[in-house]
Amino acid sequence: MSPAEKPILLLTCGDPAGIGPEVVVKAWDATPAHARARLRIVADAGMLADVLAERAGLPRPTIESIGPDDPRDSSPDRLLVIAPGSSRAGPVPEEIAISPRVAAGVVSAAGGASAAAAVETAARLVREGLARGIVTGPLHKAALHAAGIEVPGHTEMLARACGLPDTAVSMMLWLPMPAGPAGAGGLGVVHVTLHESLSGAVARLTTEGIEQAGDRLAVLLTSLLGRRPRIAIAALNPHAGESGLFGDEESRLIVPAVRHLTEKGIDATGPLPADTLFLRASRGEFDGVVAQYHDQGHIPIKLLGMHRAVNITLGLPMVRTSVAHGTAFDIVGTGAADPESMLAAIDAAVRLTEAGWPGTSQPTAAAASET
């Protein structure tokens, strides 16, 4: 395959004070995806140079700054780095591109601002047609807030960058099969509600929201698996409400959503009690689960394989995958950062671009501002 035939994927490091730069560099060195995609890192080249010089257990590739329209292939021995702020018009001047240095393992406004700038640049380059998708490292929400960036996380940041409301996108966790490629099978979990209090999440549950989550999960899993997926819808209450004794959300909200999904031809089952559902799913009975709130989906996936898990955003007009772990300030620079989740995220992004996902266009920020 010639370089021009390979999709361009942009990697961001997340908060530079965390392990994001380390897992990106390790994954860049180890991923076989260079044979199928052209990888670039959107980051401050000086920050990456500091990471390579100061942190243990890393490969030592050459760092080369490039413009966003550079067509060359990527390879393990050379990090191709695009400065935050670059656009179709070209890279930003070097003196402007340099970010303030960030102390490793420390929450800072500079770290939050640096992470956000890289994500916003990557999203803009995809919207400008200079790349196909984004693979992101972990953010630190306190650092974002210290920088005055009031978003709960990547999911909402990217939705707004694409001119979409927060409710237009969903978070999915994808757990590839152990010791196998991401496309060979696995378990996907999508969340109806996300970064909010439990009481707020319960109050915001609707039949429409549950149905939308199931729709998005079915489309994504079809692309990853190449077949019709089997989807389970989790109950909200213990024992699926026990016929109304423990709550009526199952009969009032979830049952109608499951009926609507099956009427569309989606293989959906539920509501099923969450305490046994994930055991059944882990044994291969289901390909995907619709979780009603954040921890209902995150806890079992992270127990089953936190370092293999991949975060995928559904509802965006672009491919976006991410590691499923945090910034891990406590192990920065020790050599213990595990790149497995980043490797799986890169693999999933390549597979999704090869499958032509997302298959339907959605408004970009420019289009949304005109409506």
Image (cartoon, grey):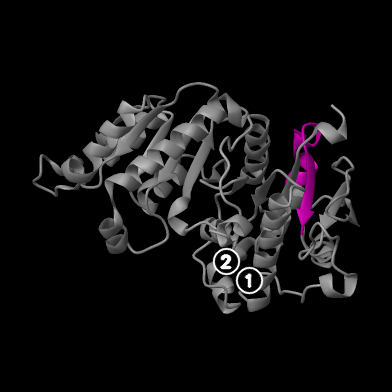
Q: Position of residue 322 (x, y in %)?
A: 60, 49
User: Which residue lies under the disc numbered 2?
Assistant: 140
Q: Observer-nearest residue: 143 or 336? A: 143
- Callout 1–callout 2 Cβ contact below 8 Å: yes
Q: Which residue is at a point 57% across and 62% down the rendered structure image? A: 369
Secondary structure under tag 2 reads loop
In the depicted structure, whether residue 161 falls above or below residue 264: below
User: Which residue lies under the disc numbered 1?
Assistant: 112
Q: Observer-nearest residue: 185 or 55? A: 185
In the depicted structure, whether residue 314 falls above or below residue 120: above
Q: Position of residue 285 (x, y in %)?
A: 37, 24
Q: Which residue is at a point 27% across and 56% down the rendered structure image? A: 202
Secondary structure under tag 1 reads helix
Q: Amino acid at mark 2?
A: His
Q: Which residues are magenta?
A: 27-42
Q: Earlier in the sequence, mark 1 or mark 2?
A: 1
Q: Observer-nearest residue: 89 or 172? A: 89
